[in-house]
């Protein structure tokens, strides 16, 4: 009787571990992961408006997205978000400034580094301090959200590239 219970318990554990392994490998793309988190709903709607869904959902890509939360967008005056949404070129530039090539986990970030964004190669300043990681002054509030094509780091501020109007 005890052997059959142990066998059943081992079988359940094997199935549970196998299921966790499948879900870990099937996190979905950056777009899927962001769309599945209501804290990124503003970002997702702007990515859709800019026509960047396919680029950020590319299964062959390896990307890091410094993703502003809804609270980060709420800190901007309403007219700024409305203006960005109405100017697709400017919106695309701002959104691509939040993306770098390659999946960079927080443990890979050195004391100080500059990395080229996908916005025309404009540089992002990434720093590690006693308080955590910052990107162009924005705090990483949640690090290392894995996706099948990269990683998301949630940030508390919308970062802006050098923009020429």
Image (spheres, rainbow, N blue to C red):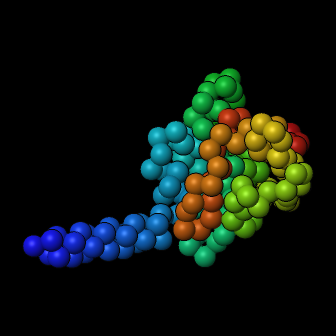
Is 38 in front, or is 128? Answer: 128
- Measuring from the top left, give residue 42's x and y in whole percent: 55, 39
- Which image quarter: residue 85? top right
Give the residue drawn at x 66%, y 69%.
62
Write down the quadrant of residue 17 in the picture.
Answer: bottom left
Q: In the depicted view, which residue is nearer to us: 123 or 112? A: 112
- Quadrant of the frame with the N terminus: bottom left
The answer, for residue 30, to whether it is visible in the render is yes
How many labels sit on residues?
Answer: 0
Residue 125 in the image: above or below residue 22: above
The C terminus lies in quadrant: top right
Q: In the image, is 11 to the left or to the right of 126?
A: left
Q: Is residue 136 visible?
A: no
What residue is at 53 percent from the left and 57 percent from the top? 31
Q: Is residue 36 left or right of residue 144?
A: left
Residue 161 horizontal side relative to residue 9, left or right: right
Residue at image coords 72%, 55%: 106
Residue 79 quadrant: top right
**Which percent across, then down, holds residue 147?**
55, 62
> Which residue corresponds to the image point at 47% horizontal and 40% vertical from the top-left?
38
Q: Is residue 67 above or below residue 58?
A: above
Residue farthest to the top, as pictured: 77
- Residue 94 location in percent, x, y? 74, 46
Q: Which one is in front, 3 or 21?
A: 3
Q: Return the x and y of residue 19 as percentages of the image width and height.
A: 35, 69
Give left or right: position of 49 versus 107. Answer: left
């Amino acid at each position: 009787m005890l052997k059959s219970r142990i066998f059943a318990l081992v079988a359940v554990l094997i199935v549970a571990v196998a299921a966790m392994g499948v879900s870990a490998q099937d996190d979905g793309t950056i777009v899927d992961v962001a769309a599945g988190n209501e804290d990124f709903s503003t970002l997702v709607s702007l990515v859709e408006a800019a026509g960047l869904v396919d680029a950020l959902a590319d299964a062959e890509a390896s990307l890091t997205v410094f993703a502003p939360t809804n609270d980060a967008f709420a800190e901007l005056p309403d007219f700024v978000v409305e203006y960005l949404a109405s100017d697709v070129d400017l919106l695309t530039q701002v959104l691509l400034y939040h993306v770098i090539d390659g999946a960079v986990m927080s443990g890979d970030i050195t004391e100080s580094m500059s990395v080229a964004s996908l916005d025309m190669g404009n540089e992002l300043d990434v720093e590690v301090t006693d308080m955590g990681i910052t990107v162009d002054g924005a705090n990483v509030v949640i690090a290392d959200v894995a996706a099948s094509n990269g990683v998301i780091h949630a940030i508390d501020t919308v970062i802006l590239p050098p923009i020429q109007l």
